[in-house]
Each structure stands twice: as C-alpha cells, then as structure tokens.
Image (tube, rainbow, N blue to C red):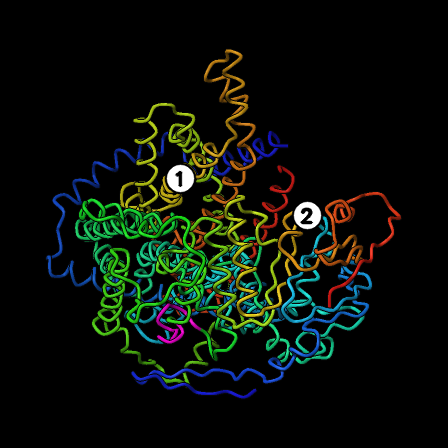
C-alpha cells in the first residue's frame, strides 16, 4: 500500500516536472540569468531609514490588528463550536460551518473585494487577513477547548455554577496559554501573507515592493523583499521562544523566579517551606491582618509588563496607522452593488485557459512537493535527534530547517522570478524550498517520535546504523511521513494558486488580471475552482490516510 | 430566585442569592431519602436497581462496592448531576425528579462534592480555587482572584486554614501534591456552606499518610458542623473505622446496610464476593 502510494507520488511528480519544463537545462539557464540579475540589482538601492521604519510600522500594525480581529471573532465561534461548552448541535454545526467557510475563501480574494470597497490602504488588509484567519484560529481554539480536562467543569457543576461561570473559571484558565500561542503563530503567518496582499493594494512593505518591481527598480524591490524577510525571521524567532515558554507551563517560570529569589535572600527560608509538613488539623486563630492578595512575584510582575507592552502596541496600531480611517468608496449603498459584481461566477470567455492554468497549478504543487520531499527526507533525517546521533549535526540541521521555514514563499518566488524569469519554474523552485522547511520539520518530528524499543533490539543483535534506519525507523514512521507529505501537498497547491500574482505560473495570474480588468465574476469562478481542487485533494488524502494506517 | 446585594466599604458590591430557608429546616426529616431508585443510561446499562435508604442529618455513611457497582452514580444522583429513571429521590426535602433547573442548582450549592481526581483548576492559585466554591451563590462569571470580594477571600483563607493549607494560598494549584490538592478541594467544598458532603473515593489516588489525613479531616469537619457525609470507599477496614454506617452495593443493588458498631470485617467483605445468590444482609440500621 505504502509502496503503491509512493510510486504514484513519484510518477505524478516526474510528470509534472517534465511538463512544466523544470530540468537541468532550465536550471543552468537560470544560473546564467542570475549573473545578469546580480548586475542589474547591484548595488542595491536602499530606501531611507525613515521610510523603512514607517513601512515596517504600517505592516506590523496591520498584521497585529488583523490577528487580534481574527482572535476576537474566533473566541465566540470556538465556544459555540465545541461540544464541551455548547450542548446544542445546531449551534455547533453552524459555527463549524462558518469556520470552514473562512478558510475556504483565500485572503487575496478577500483583499481584492475589500480594496474595491474601501480603496487602497490598511483597512482592507486588516479585514482580509482577520476574516481568513478565523479558519485556522477558530478551528484550533475549538480543538483546544475540546481538549480541556473535564474534571474542573464537573466540579463547578456540582457546586451549582452556571454555564458562563464554568466557562470562565474552569475552561479559560486551561486554554489561555494555548490561545496565546496560537495567536502568535497566526501573527507570523499573517506577516508573510501581508507581502502577497501588497500586490493587490494593501499598504505596507509588500505594497512598496510591488511598486518598485513595477517601476523595474529591481534593486529597491529586492531591498524591500530582504527587509520583510528579515522581519519574518525576527518575529518567528521571538514568537517561537515565547510559545515554547507558554506551552511548557508557567510553573517552570515560577520555579525559575523562585530559585532566583532564594539565591538573592540566602539567609531566609523560601516562602513555600515555612509551613510544617504535617500541619495541625485544628483551626488556628486567624490574625487580624491576613493577606488576601498575592504577594509580589517575578512571574506576576512579568505578566504585567507583557500586558502593558501589548496594550501599548495595540493602541499605537489603532491610532497611529490610520486603521480607523474607514471610508466606503462607493457609499454603503454601493457595498451591495460591489458584492453583486462578484456574483454569479463567470468565465469572461476564457474557460479553456483557466482550466489549463488550473492544471498547471496542480502540477506546480505536485512538482514542488516531489522536489521538496527529495531534499526534506535527508535533511529531516539528519535533524532528528535520535537518528543523527551527533549533537552538532542535529543542531545544525534543526537550525537550517527553522531558518528555511521562516522564509516567506512569495518573496522567495519573486526572487526566483527575477532571477530565472516569469513562469512556473520559478514557482516550483520557490515552493520546493519552502517544502524543505515545513516537511523537513515534520520528517524530523515523526522520526523522533519513533518507539525506541525496536531500535535498541536491532542494535543488540549487531546491526549497522543504516540497517536500523531502514528496518526499525522508517516502517514505524511511515504513516506519519505520508501524512506529512499529503499535508505539504495541500499547502503547496493552496500556495500555488497565489504564485501567479507575482508571475510564477498557475491560475493566480488570471486572479490579478481579472482584478485589473474588473472582471470580478472571474475571481469568484477561480475561487470556486481552486476550492474544488483543494476539497477533492482533502477527500483523497483522508482516504489514503485511512488506508495507510 | 431572591437575591441580596452586599455593599463593601470600598464601593465594591456583590450580588448573592439568598439561601432557601427550607434547607435549614430539614434537620427534622432525613437529609437524603431514596425510594426504589433505578437508573438506566442511554446505552442500556442499568447502574442502579431499586435502591432504597434514608440518611439522617449528621450521619457519616460509607458506600462500599467494587468498581462499577454504582457507587459513583449514586453519589452523582444525590448531587443532582443525574436524575433517576424511576423511583423517588428527595434531597434536602426537594423531590429531584420534579425539581426545576433552578431548584437543582439550589441543591447542588448546598452539597459539597470531593472527587477522586480533586478536579481543581491546576492553572489557578489555591485561594482562587477555594473561592470558586462560592460561585453557586454569586451572580455572574468570575475570573481572577480579584473578581472575588475581600470578604470572600478572607472566608476562603479561613477554610484553607482549617484544612492546614493556608500557607499555600498563593501557590499554583498544579504544583501541590495529591494529598494537599484533596485538602484544597475540601476547603472549596466548605466554601459552599454545605449541608451534605459527598466524597467519591476521596483517597483512592493518595498515599496512606495523606489518605489518613484526608479521612480524619472529613470526619472532624463533619462532626464540627454537623454535616452529613456520604463517601464511597474501596477499603473495608478504613470504612469500618471511619463511618457510622456502611451500605454495600453490588451491580446497582443494595447488598448490605448496617451500623459499624455491630458490623465485622468478614460480613462487610461479602460485598466483594463474586458468588452469586448471596442473600442481602440486613442488620440494625441506625436512624
């Protein structure tokens, strides 16, 4: 079964590569183009520091507000979508439906709609990313609520607490760390998305970059791309470390602060141990001035500092970035007229070309996943702690995977388009590189989760390292690896639909063209077409996963 | 439902529900009264079959029986978390089968429940967990220690002091040991001003020393405040030394109902026998 799936996958990958014209000759051609490219862009023309700061501020505040909007909308949806908090089946079904719908409509399409409604600026970006993000944030929030332990809820029920009281006292404290971590993760993703939205007119670094390329000012465009790249890597690093601390449980941080305090006041006994281990069971007379508010602790002080920082950032983004300057360009009456432009879907007489572009999109996804997997399996293997054996090797490859994952695919695609020219080859290479990041991580993770028992048994009977890898590790990890591969394929086909926006092949080109020619009904048709493809893929992969397991 | 507003010196105020007077009168009749209570779950499993007994105020009652014999189901009925399929169940003078939802909540407010797995919110501080015991009489949701009034926090601290945990009031609850968590759970139950204290295998996941402390606490507190305690237990010896009366269950039926003054270990152990057809043992029932 697994072998059959792999044959199919390799076959589809090779077919896609050959029909898209990705071959050694094209790559050699690309390398020689790179020389011309470097001559054209060097020296880089850097934007002024003031401009960089201003655009960075706009981009960050757009992304922050969009993420907060999606969180605010996801909270009630998640509560309604979870069986833990909502007994009504109808509510749950409706809420899940809204969440799935939000994921189905691409953020670029939403941005095109909102740019048409509100004009160029920040607001369309906030709305587009905010609404689309509900698809992920809402789902993960609902899952987090679903996974809370039922004990505290039952206890509060036995106390006679109402449903709202149970939600706030028993559920919220359990899910809060996960909620914050998910929000941060979405912030990273939205920062990457903001580059694409610049192409359709959302203000920020992405917009400046698009303008520079449109003026054929490659040096400036590449500078903006590099700035956004750097920003992505920085926020990824910061949010990854915050997430790690959050999900490890704040108890750890507490004890760290505690250790620090004990070191600081060496003479005194730490506050936790001044109670005798077997306390008297009779009531002791209460002093008149008993503390009923918690004493100072580093963890609490740190929480306050974080809260103030977040509040300040939100305030600055709300009032500094012009996010509140909402104006409907065609008036509220025009709102529905504009919506009407998108319906019913139409092909504007180019259905055959759209279908060809759709096939090309799928081919890009397949080829990129195939190439990515070829690289990701060895990279992921070396990054797995239990396989690579050498700490330095494992650390270096983990770091490599992390950095590659931090690269926004669209920016990489732009760089490839500039280097090897317009067309699907640039798209395939960009997505393949992105796949090494995500798939490499998934491969490493699933290899590390392998049961160590068979490995030990194999080494006890004197096998070599390679024998162990193929006999004990790969068969155990196979279902997880194939799951990862299918997930990557899904991600790549979704991304491939957008590559055309920057000229890297596929159906996205017609998305941009339809926006410029104002044939909005084509946008709806393209959205429906790609949704059908992604949905079909989802069904196939569900079937495959069941078979492989 | 009647409510009363408390105004505190610093301008904070708090809405409390007024305890129904009827609960304080039940001292005359039995606190809990079961007549032919039968419970069938949706899957067709019959958890209780014709269970019948009364519990007078202030009695300490131990439920014995193997896992799956219906002890937990019985306790959850008394706390109104389940309703019987047939038969009559009266708790604190209210007929549970016919009670409205608000009445069920009233009963839950006055019955403290101590769970085997403590069921505290591990992420919150000990004091906040104890304060949450007051939720039944507060109006509106609460999050954070400061959402409870100073008076409530003082009261919670008093209960913590009673179970010997006042020194841990501001610690994160998940950092406590099992025995300590169970004592905090008892303090939370005290915060309910309970008339009945229910305990579902309260010491099954504790080491012998902590188990001893917890059982002693439950007994002492019950005597101090003339509470009725119904606890399910696994260990026969422990039950005989702790309770006034023992009820043994097997497959949802009462097999044994006796005062501990006249019950010996061998008879009590018969509840655990697998031999079918053993006659139910009926000894003197303390009233």
Q: Residue at position x 46%, y 74% from top?
A: B141
Quadrant that contains the C terminus of chain A: top right
Q: Residue at position x 35%, y 75% from top?
A: B150
Q: Nearer the viewer, mark 2 or mark 1?
A: 2
In terms of depth relative to the viewer, which is nearer, B226 or A359?
B226
User: Relative to residue B154, is residue A487 depicted above or below?
Assistant: above
Q: Residue at position x 55%, y 53% from top?
A: B117
Q: Position of residue B126 (x, y in %)?
A: 41, 60
User: Relative to residue A195, is residue B19 depicted above or below?
Assistant: below
Quadrant that contains the N terminus of chain A: top right
**Residue at the extreme right:** B277
The part of the chain drawn in magenta is B142-152
Is residue B148 covered in magenta? yes
> Taking the image as drawn, is residue A300 in sight?
yes
Asked which secondary structure carries label 1, the reply is helix
User: Relative to residue B164, is residue A92 depicted above or below?
Assistant: below
Q: Within 10 angstroms of label 1, few (less than 14), some, or many (20 or more) residues?
A: many
- What residue would you read off at disc 1? A432
> Taking the image as drawn, is residue A136 in sight?
no
Is residue B94 covered in magenta? no
Left or right of A544 in this view: A513: left
- What residue would you read off at disc 2? B236
């Amino acid at each position: 079964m697994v072998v059959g799936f792999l044959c199919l996958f390799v076959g589809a990958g090779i077919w896609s590569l050959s029909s898209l014209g990705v071959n050694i000759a094209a790559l050699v051609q690309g390398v020689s183009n790179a020389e011309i490219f470097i001559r054209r862009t060097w020296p880089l023309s850097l934007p002024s520091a003031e401009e960089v700061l201003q655009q960075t501020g706009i981009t960050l505040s757009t992304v922050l507000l969009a993420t907060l909007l999606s969180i605010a909308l996801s909270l009630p949806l998640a509560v309604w979508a979870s069986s833990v908090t909502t007994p009504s089946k109808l509510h749950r079904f409706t809420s899940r439906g809204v969440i799935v719908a939000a994921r189905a409509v691409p953020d670029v399409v939403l941005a095109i709609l909102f740019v048409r409604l509100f004009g160029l600026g920040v607001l369309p970006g906030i709305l587009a990313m905010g609404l689309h993000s509900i698809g992920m944030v809402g789902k993960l929030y609902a899952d987090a609520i679903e996974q809370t332990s039922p004990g505290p809820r039952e206890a509060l029920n036995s106390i006679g607490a109402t449903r709202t009281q149970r939600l706030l006292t028993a559920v919220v404290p359990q899910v809060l760390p996960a909620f914050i971590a998910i929000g941060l993760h979405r912030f990273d993703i939205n920062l990457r998305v903001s580059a694409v939205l610049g192409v359709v007119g959302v203000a920020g670094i992405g917009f400046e970059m698009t303008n520079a390329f449109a003026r054929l000012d490659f040096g400036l465009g590449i500078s903006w791309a590099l700035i956004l790249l750097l920003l992505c890597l920085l926020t990824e690093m910061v949010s990854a470390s915050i997430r790690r601390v959050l999900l490890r449980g704040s108890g750890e941080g507490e004890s760290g602060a505690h250790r620090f305090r004990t070191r600081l006041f060496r003479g005194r006994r730490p506050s936790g141990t001044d109670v005798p281990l077997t306390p008297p069971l009779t009531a002791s007379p209460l002093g008149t001035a008993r503390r009923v508010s918690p004493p100072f602790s580093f963890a609490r002080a740190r929480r306050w500092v974080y809260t103030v920082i977040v509040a300040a950032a939100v305030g600055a983004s709300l009032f500094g970035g012009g996010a509140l300057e909402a104006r409907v360009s065609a008036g509220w009456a025009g709102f529905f007229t504009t919506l009407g432009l998108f319906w019913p879907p139409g092909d504007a007489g180019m259905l055959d070309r759209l279908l060809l572009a759709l096939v090309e999109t799928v081919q890009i996804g397949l080829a990129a996943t195939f190439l990515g997997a070829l690289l990701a399996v060895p990279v992921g293997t070396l990054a797995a702690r239990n396989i690579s054996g050498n700490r330095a090797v494992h650390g270096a490859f983990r770091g490599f995977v992390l950095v590659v994952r931090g690269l926004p695919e669209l920016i990489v695609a732009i760089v490839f388009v500039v280097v090897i020219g317009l067309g699907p080859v640039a798209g395939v290479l960009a997505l393949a590189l992105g796949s090494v990041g995500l798939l490499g991580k998934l491969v490493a993770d699933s290899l590390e989760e392998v049961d160590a028992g068979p490995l030990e048994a194999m080494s006890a009977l004197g096998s070599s390292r390679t024998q162990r890898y193929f006999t004990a590790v790969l068969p155990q990890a196979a279902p997880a690896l194939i799951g990862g591969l299918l997930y990557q394929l899904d991600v790549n086909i979704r991304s491939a639909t957008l590559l055309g926006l920057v000229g890297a092949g596929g159906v996205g080109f017609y998305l941009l063209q339809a926006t410029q020619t104002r044939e909005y009904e084509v946008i709806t048709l393209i959205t429906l077409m790609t949704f059908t493809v992604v949905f079909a893929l989802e069904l196939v992969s569900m079937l495959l996963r069941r078979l492989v397991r | 439902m009647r409510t009363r507003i408390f105004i505190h010196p610093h301008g904070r105020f708090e809405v409390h529900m007024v305890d129904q007077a009827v609960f304080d009168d039940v001292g005359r009749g039995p606190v809990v009264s079961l007549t032919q209570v039968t419970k069938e779950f949706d899957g067709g499993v019959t958890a209780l079959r014709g269970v019948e007994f009364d519990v007078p105020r202030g009695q300490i009652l131990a439920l014995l029986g193997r896992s799956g014999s219906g002890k937990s189901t019985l306790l959850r009925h008394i706390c109104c978390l389940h309703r019987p399929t047939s038969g009559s169940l009266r708790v604190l003078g209210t007929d549970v089968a016919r009670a409205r939802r608000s009445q069920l909540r009233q009963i839950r407010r006055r019955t403290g429940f101590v769970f085997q797995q403590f069921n505290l919110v591990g992420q919150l501080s000990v004091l906040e967990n104890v304060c949450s015991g007051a939720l039944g009489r507060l109006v509106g949701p609460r999050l954070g220690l400061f959402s409870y009034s100073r008076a409530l926090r003082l009261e919670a601290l008093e209960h913590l002091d009673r179970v010997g945990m006042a020194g841990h009031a501001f610690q994160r609850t998940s950092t406590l040991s099992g025995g300590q968590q169970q004592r905090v759970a008892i303090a939370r139950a005290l915060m309910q001003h309970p008339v009945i204290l229910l305990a579902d295998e309260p010491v099954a996941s504790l080491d012998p020393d902590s188990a001893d402390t917890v059982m002693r606490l439950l007994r002492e507190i019950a005597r101090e405040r003339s509470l009725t305690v119904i606890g399910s237990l696994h260990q026969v010896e422990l039950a005989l030394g702790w309770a006034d009366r023992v009820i043994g269950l097997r497959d949802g039926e009462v097999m044994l109902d006796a005062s501990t003054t006249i019950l010996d270990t061998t008879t009590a152990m018969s509840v655990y026998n697998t031999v079918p057809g053993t006659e139910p043992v009926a000894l003197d029932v303390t009233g």
